[in-house]
Image (cartoon, coloured by chain):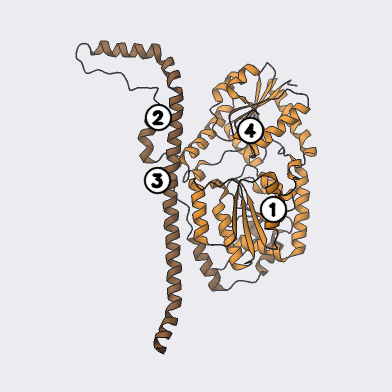
Amino acid sequence: MPSAIHQVTPTLSWGDAVGNQVRLLRRWFREAGHESEVFSGRTDERSRGESISVDELPDHVARGDLVLVHHSIQSRLVPLLRRVARKASVAVIFHNVTPPALIAPYDPPLAAACAAGLEELRELAPIAPLALTFSRFSAKDLDAAGFAEVKVVPFPLEFAALDTRPDEALRSELDDGMTNVLFVGRGAPNKRIEEVLRVFTAYQRLFDPKSRLVLAGELNREHPYGAFIWGVRDALGPERVHILGRVSDAQLAACFATASVYLSMSAHEGFGVPLIEALYRGVPVIAYDAGAVAETLGGAGWVCRSADPIVYARLIAVLQRRPEVRRAVIERSRLRARAFDPANTRDAFFDALMSGAMRSTG
Amino acid sequence: MKRSVVNASELATDTPPPEDLAKLANEIPDPTEIVERELRERLDRIAPPSAHDDGPGRWPPILEEPRLRADSRYADPATSHRPLIGPVLVAAKRSFRFLFQPFINEVLRRQVEFNQSILSSLALMYEQVKVNAQTQAMWRKEVERRLEALEAAADPAQRQTRRLE
């Protein structure tokens, strides 16, 4: 049993899936009696002081410690981790890497970083015999990279954060009897927000003029993809598209509290935290079948492989016009969300981590 | 025009089963064919920007040269055009670099980081300009189409007005 379990992440940010998980795991490890610190290469403004510079990692680890490396993009940390692996066990938590081809038309340097991230995954395999991930979809990448032991574990998620009280101002603005179609996610090309706009335009034009699209998540107009999305919105011309940008927990709660349906048209997801948030808060999910989306939803929510936006518009219309179907979907969604309750996932996560780590140290 | 139909084979859900869901979706009254055709034409006009011709993840051609020079720690191989003293100078340059390269690297490390950061920002700005130009062109075409449709709709009314005059 390692006395210390430290985590390494290239960037520690506030509000993103990796950052939230790093903080939750640190709390779990400390509660379980392990010494636990976070080491990062960079931090954003709100996370300053929460982590130690990754350059100091070799001085902190002792023989028998366990170092968990969160991997989702190029980190340039492989040489340092090679040194650390001489005295401590190293395990990888793989959040998946966005395929470079999806990003390249908008951000070639980021696409190059993703390509390098996939290359680094292969270099990490000999250093870290154990790799954990959250879907069978992502596990295939780990198997291909050559990891000795790959385990699919339940996604550690903080349910308490999902019970935040909704922001009253935003709630009253959105709660006006309109059909609210919601998408939550940072403005990245793999999220295909342009497809969300196409589906919503079709729905509003064909089935429900009194509808609104709410996009929550950072979407920077100064970024090529943000500029494209604003251009698509102008060209399609739907009414009532609310681009909220980055929102607080309370504002996000207001978005979910007033949402009629959660729509995801993402082309690549290694897991999909907002999908679970939607299930937990009783918002029916309609999603394009990509990556680990169907696996995450586990039969709850409606997953579709069609490329036709009008098909998705029809599915939204079914939810809005058939209350008995809507009720059944919400009930099924809440049942699925329980599978991610920390009360159920915490032990399973620890068992997978500890048994794998013990084996890798021999 | 092909009307949109929800196929059970494209659905994955257990509440309700895909066959039932497809039936429910296809029971939703169809919009008129004209409305659906006009909408589909509009939706199909949205095209994502294209990647560079030389493949994903490549740098814009205009930034290829700066990218090659961003790492200022390493100089070109030592050479000399002088006939006699040249080899001595080359050997001296090589020895100097051999001895002092770690110090050169350390002194220039921050400069290299700055160069790479500026280069990334320039690449992003390049893409921003390209995407802006493409989306503006897309939007201009859309406005022109809508203007043409308005003019076409207004034409019979104008002809009628002229006839009455």
Residue at the disc numbered 1: A169
Instruction: Residue at 52%, 61% (x, y): give it.
Output: A236
Q: Which residue is mark 2?
A: B70
Instruction: Name the residue nearer the viewer: A239 or B54.
Output: A239
On screen, A267 above or below B34?
Answer: above
Name the mark on residue A47.
Answer: 4
Taking the image as drawn, is residue A151 in sight?
no
In the image shown, does A128 or B70 lie closer to the viewer? B70
Chain containing the residue with disc 4? A
Per the image, the residue denoted by label 3 is B53
Chain drawn in brown: B
Kind of residue at disc 1: Ala
Residue type for callout 3: Asp
Residue A262 position, x and y percent, is 67, 54
Q: Earlier in the sequence, mark 3 or mark 2?
A: 3
Using the numbered discs, state the Cα–Cα distance from disc 3 to disc 4 in whole angstroms. 39 Å
The chain identifier of the residue carrying mark 3 reads B
